[in-house]
Every structure is written in structure tokens, then in C-alpha cells.
Amino acid sequence: MSWFIRQEKGIQTPTSQKKESPDGLWYKCPSCKKVMLTHELQANYYTCLNCNYHEKIGSAEYFAILFDNNEFEELNPNMTSADPLKFVDSKDYPTRIAEAQKKTGLKDAIRTAYGKMNSIDIVIACMDFEFIGGSMGSVVGEKIARAIDFCIEKRLPLLIISRSGGARMMEAGFSLMQMAKTSAKLALLDKAGLPYISLLTDPTTGGVTASFAMLGDFNIAEPNALIGFAGPRVIRETIGRDLPSGFQTAEFVLEHGFLDFIVHRKDLKDELTSLLKMILPKNGNGK
């Protein structure tokens, strides 16, 4: 016999009194489908507790992971795109930029900042995919160029975290020129004898892969990151052949010699610190 018997039929709780879990409390891993608390995911550096899937994150999260106490000075924070081509597709380019800024709270697809990482002075440039697919326009190229100038002036190492769909079509040739511009600036950084580490995350494609993302003194990546120039579907249709298993994953790219190593996000700060201590002068940040 049940210890509780409902005496009245048809009792309904008003919507205003229903208790629901707040949005964002739970996270379901898209890889293994395991459900966990969101704060557990965040405490594990935004990686799955079960399968180590690396959730896609942006500059705010990477800065919090890498900069000591999340303290940094942002460089050129208010730079925004112009509309040199008066470009219009389904909407005009300035409207698209304004909508992306309102949605993301960002000015463009990259943020650059100076701070300390395990007490080592460093400049970090991090791309944000949420801003028009992390596309590389004039602002992205200019902020990277100015970050490199800052590194040369202050004698600092540079880390660029790439996550991008490639060049920004709304700026056409202006966007493509950022490939040459950033590559030339990195040559100056190399001439100055300063290290550049490139971290490729999921996805890194198009003109970003074809320029600064693959020009690091050390090219490293997160596990299972998609890395390539053209997408797998385009390549498959072009060559008319099936692609190898795992094609364009970080592991595939590493196996074929285009990466130096793959690093789990929870180890990223310590791995970068160890790397910089080996290559920086002992009387500088390398201690």
C-alpha cells in the first residue's frame, strides 16, 4: 500500500510556481554524450571529464587560463572594421559588424593582450570564432601586426591562438593582404630573435592556416582540432577520392610533420612556460 494517496484529482501547478533547472547548469559532451555540471566542465579547463573532448572557447577563457590571476593589459581594444568596399550581401557590412559586436560583446575576431604567464612576460593574441566565424579581416591583421611591434619594442615572446574559418569575404582583397602583412611582421619578430608560438585550435582553416598559424617557431595544437586550408568536402570533390581516416585532425597533421606537439588544455600553461624557459635568455624572462 502506498504511503501517499492523492485525494484530489486534476491538481495542476501554475507555471509561475514550477521549479526548473537554470539555463547553463548542465553540459552534455557532444563527443561522448556524457552529462556533467557546467562548473565541473569549467574547472576542468572546459574539457570533458570522461573523454577529454575540448569544448570550443574564446579569448576570455584562454586569457583566464593563461594569464596569472587573469590579469592583463589589452592592446588596441577599441579597433573596429571599416567598410572599404561598401560590401552588401543579405545585409550591408557595417550592419553585420554591429550585430556581431552586440551579440558577442567583442570589437572584432581577435583580442591581443600583455601580461604574465607563470611570471613570464608574454603577449597573447587570441581569436574569437563567435565573431563572424573568427574571420580574418583588416582589424585582425592590424592587431597582430601591432602586437608584434609591441613584442619587438619590449623584447617579449608572442603566442597566437588561432580559431578561424579563414579570410573575411566582406573585405575581399583587403582581407587576403593580411596574410602577407602578418607573415612579413613575423619575419621581423624572427629577425629580432624573439620566439613565436602558434597554438592551433578547432577549427583553424583557410587563410589563417596559410599564413601566421603555421609560421610559429613552435606549431602546437589541441587534441582533435580541425586544421587545414580547404574543407574536407571541397578536397574530396576536387580530387575525386575518399580521404584517410582522421584527415585534417591535429593528430593527422602531427603525424605528417606539420606540428611539433599536441597539448591538453589543462597542461597548456605549464607546457608553454617550460618551452619559453628553454628558449628565452637566462637573464630575461627565462630566469
Image (tube, rainbow, N blue to C red):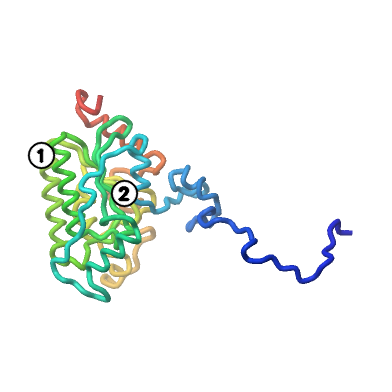
Q: Is residue 218 visible?
A: no
Reading the image, the residue beneath label 2 is: 254
CA neighbours of label 2 inside 10 A, class few (<14), some (14 to 19), many (20+) = some
Residue at image coords 22%, 32%: 279
Q: Is residue 28 left or right of residue 121?
A: right
Q: Quadrant of residue 2?
A: bottom right
Q: Residue 62 in the image: x percent, y percent? A: 35, 45
Q: Is residue 85 above or below residue 250?
A: below
Q: Earlier in the sequence, mark 2 or mark 1?
A: 1
Instruction: Confirm or deny contact between disc 2 and disc 1 (CB under 8 A).
Output: no
Reading the image, the residue beneath label 1 is: 191
Q: Which mark is residue 135?
A: none
The amino acid marked with disc number 2 is Leu
Q: Nearer the viewer, residue 262 or 137?
A: 137
Work out which quarter of the rendered image holds the N terminus and state it. Answer: bottom right
Q: Is residue 105 visible?
A: yes
Q: Quadrant of residue 283?
A: top left
**Depth-wise, is mark 2 or mark 1 nearer the camera?**
1
Q: Residue 109 in the image: x percent, y percent? A: 27, 56
Residue at image coords 39%, 38%: 267
